[in-house]
Image (tube, rainbow, N blue to C red):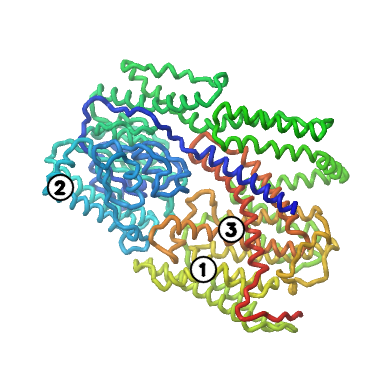
Amino acid sequence: MNMLIFIMAGLLVHCVFLASIFDIYFTSPLVHGMTPQRTPLPPPAKRLVLFVADGLRADTLYEIDDNGTPRAPYLRNIIEYKGSWGVSHTHVPTESRPGHVALIAGFYEDVSAVAKGWKENPVEFDSVFNESKYTWSWGSPDILPMFAKGASGDHVYTYCYTAEKEDFGAQDATKLDTWVFDHVKNFFQAAGSNQTLFSKVNEEKVVLFLHLLGIDTNGHAHRPNSREYKDNIRKVDDGINDIVSLLEDFYGNDGKTAFILTSDHGMTDWGSHGAGHPSETLTPLIAWGAGVNYPQKVTSQFFEDEFLKEWKLENWKRLDVNQADIAPLMASLIGVPFPLNSVGILPLDYLNNSAHFKAESMFTNAVQILEQFKIKMTQKKETTLSFLFVPFHSQMLWRTDVTTLHCHHNLSGVCMPRLRLLSDTEQINILRKARSYIHQEKYHEAASTVLLLYGFAATGVLIAFFLLIQTCPWTYYIYCLLPVPVWYAVVKEFRVIQDLVSLLLVFPLGQSIGFLGAGALGIEILVFSFFYRSTLTVGLIAFAGWPLITRLWAQAKVTTLSWTLLCLLLAMFPLMPVVGREPNISLVTVAGLVILLISSFSLASLCKSRNKYVPKKDLTILLFQMLNIALSTYVVNSTHNSLHHKQGLPVINQIISWTTLASSLFVPLLSPTFFFQRLLSILLSLMSPYLLLSTGYEALFPLVLSGLMFAWIYMEKEALQYYGDSLKTKLAVLNFSCSTDITQFRQLHLDDIRRSFFFVFFIMTAFFGTGNIASVNSFDPASVYCFLTVFNPFIMGSLLVWKIVIPFVLVSCAFEAVQVTTQLSSKSLFLLVLVISDIMALHFFFLVKDYGSWLDIGTSISHYVLVMVFTIFIMLLSGLAQLLTTKRIELWGRTKRHSM
């Protein structure tokens, strides 16, 4: 009971620590209460047309075809004769929602928006659409509604196709863009005969938004270097040409329409996006029409990349911007207030207007950013003690006069860092100050238990009082007060720590230093695996030499040889490219055939076993699982062949896939609970959905990993015999259902620390063996095509998570077998695992950043979160492994037990 309370308390502490990171770093940076800022001079344009080609890469649009012609001739003509162009630099995460928010609202949405849903607004925000007189938008149901929902009044209109049309397996994804162009044409045709609508579209401050999803869909389905992706760009180019001609005719060539073409994000060569690769962060920006500069000829220009020569655009001035800068550009062109939460800086080089207009626009932009800074600082001042609050010296810039407008860039440069600083560190400053009170606590050996209790109680009261007078949120009390009882429990058990140190001093100094050094090196390898997958290869090579160091080689040559070969084979996977880059369905077929071959040998072995009766129902279950493997192998080949010929996803394949997935956790519970029969049943059941979710070499990964897990179980049995601790029972007759907690038979020794470390290392290998999951761009949508092809981020994400979990389950079930084999309490080994994972979590805690690029911040936080989630997740994995190994469902009556 005490152990259960201890584990639950530890789980609670870990959950609080995990939640604190989201509360501190993922709290929305937006503030409210600012005054809208608008340029007082008449705008150059009455209306703005925004084309967003979803998933369009800058290089693919601007580059020249193999035959020397532009891929988008109309837009190329705009660049050379009518408008301005450049590259828009996006921020991580390079996903649809954050990209569109940056474009239209002018700020970089925090990453938590991904978890809160693409179609809902985590927080209300202002946008160019909201500030417009009217906005009409056409396109995806995943993007348009979020800007209409947050808009005040009823002036943002959306026209969306159904979600079912977003099908990666569709015969022609360009129909998504054709749908948009056709509906825009129908809209203006209707406006010509509808006086009310005609009056609205002729108002000032009108925005037309065309969201073009076909390029993104073709990129996911066929890759950006495919003919389908490039042909889609040409169709978009033709469609934009038609729309521009239509609008010029409709408005009588009044010269009051501004046009902008850009993209929310790019795409990797393997058809994914979400991370910080240049192919994902470099998107095109082309602007022309009313108020936009004409092309500027230059003799030379310098950029770090070499794209200008490749694109043959070195003589036309390239004007790069940050993605959020496009929002103030649009606002300036049509004369609407700058979005209240925008952090974009107006790109003046794109404007074709008077110096007076530019100066007023610069000033408006600066004041709009400064308004956010003032609100944020006021909020900070109200919740901080007066003697702790130190204002920034830039306050004097509040009195900036219009005569000093040329200091706009200095003003923006001063305000923006301060605004980000207040947004990112406002909460953690208080926590750091409060935490300092805890760090000052010293243990005095002479203090009695009562005085110790009173001392920590007084510390808690002091921290609570400090938070109270600063009107801090209730969560801050949890974060700052939780360490008090934790440190009280540690200090109270100081004598136990002394005894442990004394025990360690008994060992020779060299041996103690060597053991600690080996442990530190092992944990550092685990930490480095988050940054460099190849470090796992180093660890596995070291594991391969373990039997030679311990002299187990002489005791069990066949077992140790199998262990060494499988370690070296598994060590190859972290050196391979991230999953998704090079699909190879033939490797999935090979994996299916290999697992069928292994199961056939196992079936023959069961049938030929001497002195052992194998019930027919057990053989039936094994045959059923083999049939599932064969069907899964067929479905993968059939599905990808059908999609390659643009025939869609066959319904029968979809039914088989979902049925296989649903039965994967149920069927193993029907098999016997003898060690290898149950472990084989779990492997066969989980391999079926894993094959369906595979697109390349990763299909072989669970096979090699499982082989190593079987070898690990045998190696631990041999290790116990080497130390003379093993019972005489053979592994073949051990039964999971008969395992009990046998702590009384032996206590922990140093070899158990190695076993726990092996488990953590194998979990990390399962996590990073085929890709770096800390980056979402390792996800290939093609891996879920056997289940669905219509875009659904939640179902697709769930299938991806299950694919990731399957290797974890295999390792956890093997660890259950090791616990039974080594005759040690599962709780004892579990606590050792927690200690190792907590040391890793502490390491990543000190690496968390709240400064730098979104990629740096997001990576540092995701690493800490992954380790903390692993610590919590390991408890769930342990429970799932116990369920899969020890429980059996009897559908045909009770099975008679026969021993060998």
- Regarding mark 3 in the picture, which secondary structure is present there? helix
The residue positioned 68% from the left and 47% from the top of the image is 9
Q: Which of marks 2 and 1 is nearer the N terminus?
A: 2
- Give how far apart the Cα atoms at labels 2 and 1 are: 52 Å
Q: Which amino acid does label 2 sit on?
A: Ala
Residue 345 horizontal/vertical position (percent): 36, 30
Instruction: Answer whether labels 1 and 3 touch (C-beta < 8 Å).
Output: no
Location of residue 257 by image quarter? top left
The residue at 15%/44% (across/down) is 196
Q: Is residue 591 above or below residue 405?
A: below
Q: What residue is pinned by disc 2?
A: 191
Q: Which amino acid does label 3 sit on?
A: Phe
Position in image of residue 93 (x %, y %) = 45, 44
587 or 276, which lies in front?
276
Q: Which mark is residue 573?
A: 3
Report, in whole angstroms, how far the alpha carbon at label 1 lies from the one at label 3: 29 Å
Whether tag 2 and tag 3 are in contact, CB under 8 A, the answer is no
Q: Viewer-proximal residue, 877 or 619? A: 877
**Residue 656 vertical placement versus 464 (above, below):** below
Task: Determine crowd level at label 3: few under 14, some 14-19, many 20+ residues with C-alpha closer than 10 A.
Answer: many
In this rendering, position of residue 832 left or right of residue 446: left
Of pointers 1 and 3, the one earlier in the residue sequence: 3
